Image (cartoon, rainbow, N blue to C red):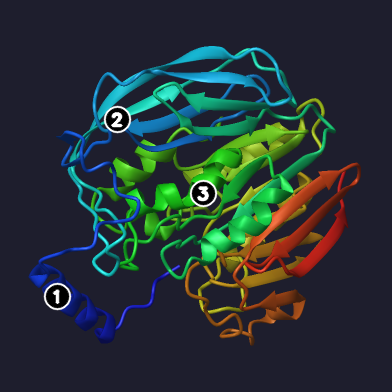
Amino acid sequence: MRTSSSSCVVLFGALFTVLAGCSTDPETPSNAPDAGAEPDAGLVCPETGITKGPWVLAVDGSRAKVRWEACKAGTKAAISLSEEAGGEATEVASVETPFEVTVMGTAPLNVNAPPDYPGTYYMHEASPSGLKPGTCYRYELSAEPARKGRFCTAQPPGGPVRFMAIGDTNPALGGHTQKILSQVLPKGPDFTIHGGDIQYYDSTLETWAYWFPELQPMLSQGAFFPAIGNHESELVGEFEQYYLRFFGGAGFDGTNDYYRFETGGIYFFSLNTELPLDLGTVQGTWLSAQLDAASKKPGFRFSVVYLHKTLVTCGDTGQATAVREQFEPLFTQYKVPLVVQAHMHGYERFEINGITYVTSAGGGGSIGNVDENIERPECAMRVASGKYRHAMLFEVGPGELKGSAIGPDGAVVDSFTKAVP
């Protein structure tokens, strides 16, 4: 969603810049790289050469992508991988690809947020294959073993599925995002779907260099499957040089803008609401065809659609009523019982024609007015709402789907259970 901006913020930002420029003893960012290392790519490069990550994308029943960023060439290009339950570790080599960044991002109101410097970065990607389905793995970077994580391969059809949904994360704004994660991650989600607006330059509080270490617990917990929000393009070139460099190729059978993945016979569809989505558009045609194709796959149970901007809301944003009305018959036909949306900073749950629409955009940003458009006819079908910072924990078992909205204090602010195939 939009971030609030006012003349007060602008004036304070200007005052902060002047004061910072006059300081003779500027505060060092708490998570800045080692100041004793040789500089490269416009920043102080740590001895290990690793600056971001790791994180995991594009997981299916037998393979995954483990990605990380280095600030110098020639760091040890491998991960050590083993089954979480125990067993011998194997080394999986990564491919190093240089990437020239020309866009600089800063956080003028947060001295603890290192700038995103232009320069040459070296993206690493390890692609383990031949993995066992329904199995969790642990990995660590050979160049810096303290940087590690886990991921779980796709469950066979009918297997249990547990995942987190979060949207509009803004970890530098009061630490709410980190508090939410501290409550939800211990519950063991196997992967995260993100509803978009992943990082906010517009808040003037954070950069990607700040975001990654703060949200590393989420990235280390399991695979990351983001949808694209409007704040992925705040700076000219940011989408290509940051979002796509970090998260491009997150799924299958689509593009960098929209894609799908599957686990346990459940097909997940990540959409890009910054592109046209009506039936007959390129993305809309892809979605309708892929919903149909998924429904014919062996072991198919149902599908989940997630996206950034809302199809239905009573809050302080628009809603894509025409798109929802176009796709609802297809959602019913192709067994889509759940749509997860973000953008409207707060929480909502609608029950419309057998489909549950959850607005999960309380991932840490400033909370909006969830009732600003309460006069909309669809609001009669809203069954729960609140000005809640939260993330969703979804659990799918035999014949049912459970959803819980969990706040930064661990309180469950809403929960529901519905029958699914």
Asked whether 282 or 378 is in front, the reply is: 378
Mark 3 near mark 2, Cβ–Cβ under 8 Å? no
- Return the residue at label 3: 227
Asked whether 213 or 403 is in front, the reply is: 213
Residue 69 coordinates in the image, percent (x, y): 35, 33
- Horizontal relation, residue 251 to residue 203: left or right: right
Gap between marks 2 and 1 measured at Cα: 32 Å
Residue at left 38%, top 77%? 4
Label 3 Cα neighbours within 10 Å, binned few <14 / some 14-19 / many ≥20: many
Q: Give, as a three-letter code, the residue at label 3.
A: Ala
Asked whether 296 or 258 is in front, the reply is: 258
Say which label, 3 or 1, has the lower sequence index. 1
Say which element carries label 1.
helix
- Horizontal relation, residue 27 to residue 156: left or right: left
* Quarter of image, res 251: top right
- Return the residue at label 1: 19
Q: Give, as a three-letter code, the residue at label 2.
A: Gly
